[in-house]
Image: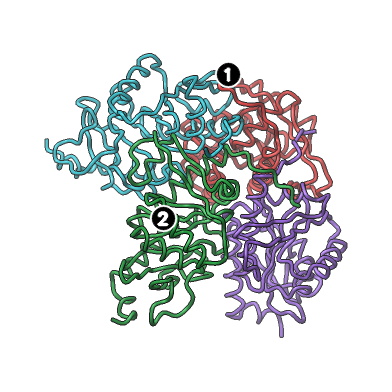
Chain colours: A green, B cyan, C red, D purple
């Protein structure tokens, strides 16, 4: 089946619009500044097919044509033109490992600062907050959610391998941070992934307001 | 009278739309992240009938069908499908105790942090601010408003009993916090309850900016 | 000339719409929470006639009918129904003393906190910021702008007298704070008053981020 | 060719609309309070022709007629009425030195505070953040971006000369700060300049949250 048919079919247009709507809401909260962030929904688990944001598009006004279809290893499927987000490979890795229906990656000031601050210990624990219940499977505030922080890297292959390792070790995750970079969060559906991003970001702001960050010297 | 008739009547549609409009404004301020928050207007005081948000609906785009009618003890009335908010019982309790025309429950970063910080003493006092006059019955800034903080719990029956006790002890309240969870505020009308939420949140941000929160260690 | 004619004339409708637009923009920035704030444009300097917001109306969706006409001493003109803002007298006093074309009063978190913090010394100095040039008559950042802080009071007659005294002593003012209450700012026109509010609030946030506020203990 | 023709031609209308859209988005983020900020796109590099915001116009609702065409030294071209932004000369200087397709100047609380704080050392270094890759030509977070801070001045000729000197010494810049004043950022295109502003402001907020600013005493 040629990609062409796939793209023009009604269901895919609906997926495109749904993703654009969610990304627009994330961008409106300041989490996609300067064309930042990348976002996908899963079309097929096997062989893997993801609808994902193209590189360099500003997310505040994302339109259906700002999305493209990629396959395994984050490579564009046959018939697709243009370049996917540089981090398409991470999306593919996360979907392969978790079966996620959507992966959302945002940059916020709190997630950038917390990732930087907690890079050395490799993560931090959130506990005691009711909003933790917004993460799928959590039914009480009396819980501890570990947010892993991976060192940032421009070597996507190495980073994807590290992510794959993390997801094997900690199978129940809904998200992780890249240090000084941002949040990857996912869910069984686009709505669930969206909810997870908002929950994490809310809790990150709570944590960031209480965190004694290392003073910025400008040197 | 079957619920069906009730739901399709003009007055109830107006109530649904009014509640959706208010909830949309609250959500736009970041107080309902990740499907958080729940909201009701009182249709009848006795027997109790509340129009309340369904569980799991995102509040940013709440539509009339995202609401349902519950009766005493927060149970759906006959003919209603779906699940009300988990905390419907608290709404019913508050309306029963205070005669409130509307109960609004929001999660904000300041209300989460202040609730957590002041859980041990069981509350905190706001004083000296002009905006306190936005709370019904207060006519001068030279006043003290105590904001009770109850320990959070997943046992809604126990929590509802605790809330009932609080409302007997302190009958003049317009709201309280659940520690690390959020604000419950109410008023004689939907507009008054809305005003109370905005007043509390404004004052919470004032207080939070001055509060020496316990440093977040991530451990 | 009966007020009726005045109200229905085209020019006044234009003034109403202009004021509603400005107030809507101020409210969208969070400066009129909980029906807070009051706002006027001057229709006539003598005898004084102001178009001013009615009491208790939420400013986020202010409509032309949410405004009314008052005369000297802040009293409704003949034919007007309803109650003006409690602080209408202050508007009248400011217009009488300065010839302002518009007076705008907003509550923001920084203006509330700075007013509270600097109540004892009676004000604070802003200096060195380019944005000071947004205040009429200031042409360089190398200037000092004193922001007076008056003690808050519910006695509007006493407060109006204090404001009148202040405006005689410091004739070049564009605004002042009431401690723990908010900002009064004005200008020769509605647009200038609007600009002054935005300039003050920008500079207040700059100052507030640097101010060592007294810790909030909740006691 | 008379300016008149130029202004009414379709391409220039498109440029006006594009610039209005970008400025509106910047203003919506609070970076153009009180008519602050000025913005240009380059129509011709030689002889220099810039489309630039008129002085005193609020940027939140910028319309095509709020723009005008200037030539070398920031002077209005023949046929143009009105006054360009006071800082038009700086725009002209930056375009002449860098070949920028657009220059955007915004005031934000973090850029004002950081400029003030780092005026003495003459700038500060941003490092380690993924978002640095949003600046053209940067391909890794493992980099250092120096943000120069020039002393603010009302002498535009002197300031323009200083800017010209800076751009010769540090040819790879995408922006600089004026102390206590704001950010100048530019790019090869309007979209790139827009992206650079958002990237800088994001990183400024990250830095500002970690900066131990000198306490504000109000004296």
Q: What secondary structure is marked by label 2?
A: helix
Q: Chain of mark 1?
A: B
Q: Residue at coordinates 77% horizontally, 46% vertically from top-left?
A: D117
Q: Residue at coordinates 40% horizontally, 30% vertically from top-left?
A: B184
Q: Chain of mark 2?
A: A
Q: Are marks 1 and 2 in contact (CB under 8 Å)?
A: no
**Camera-nearest residue between D80 and D13:** D13
Residue C98 location (% of width, % of height): 73, 37
Q: Residue at coordinates 73% horizontally, 56% vertically from top-left?
A: D125
Residue C169 vertical placement versus D204 (above, below): above
Marks 1/2: CA–CA distance: 56 Å
Q: Which residue is mark 1?
A: B142
Residue D24 location (% of width, % of height): 58, 60
Q: Is residue C80 visible?
A: no
Relative side of A207 to B195, left or right: right
**Camera-nearest residue between A47 and C134:** A47
Residue depth check, mark 1 versus mark 2: number of the one nearer the observer:
2
Residue A55 location (% of width, % of height): 51, 70
Q: Which mark is residue A167?
A: 2
Give the farthest residue toward the left.
B1
Relative side of C168 to C40, left or right: right
């Amino acid at each position: 089946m040629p990609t062409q048919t796939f793209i023009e079919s009604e269901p895919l247009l609906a997926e495109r619009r749904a993703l654009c709507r969610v990304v627009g809401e994330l961008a409106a909260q300041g989490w996609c500044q300067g064309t930042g962030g990348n976002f996908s929904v899963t079309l097929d688990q096997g062989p893997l097919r993801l609808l994902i944001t193209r590189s360099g598009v500003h997310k505040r006004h994302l339109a259906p044509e700002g999305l493209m279809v990629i396959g395994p290893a984050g490579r564009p499927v046959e018939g697709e033109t243009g370049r996917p987000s540089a981090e398409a490979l991470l999306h593919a890795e996360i979907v392969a490992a978790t079966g996620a229906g959507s992966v959302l990656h945002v940059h916020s000031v709190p997630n950038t600062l917390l990732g930087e601050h907690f890079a050395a210990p490799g993560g931090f624990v959130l506990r005691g907050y009711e909003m933790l219940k917004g993460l799928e499977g959590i039914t009480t505030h009396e819980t501890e959610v570990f947010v892993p922080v991976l060192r940032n890297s421009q070597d996507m292959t190495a980073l994807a391998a590290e992510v794959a390792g993390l997801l094997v070790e900690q199978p129940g995750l809904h998200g992780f941070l890249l240090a000084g970079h941002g949040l990857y969060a996912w869910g069984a559906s686009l709505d669930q992934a969206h909810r997870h991003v908002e929950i994490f970001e809310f809790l990150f702001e709570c944590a960031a307001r209480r965190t004694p960050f290392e003073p910025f010297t400008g040197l």
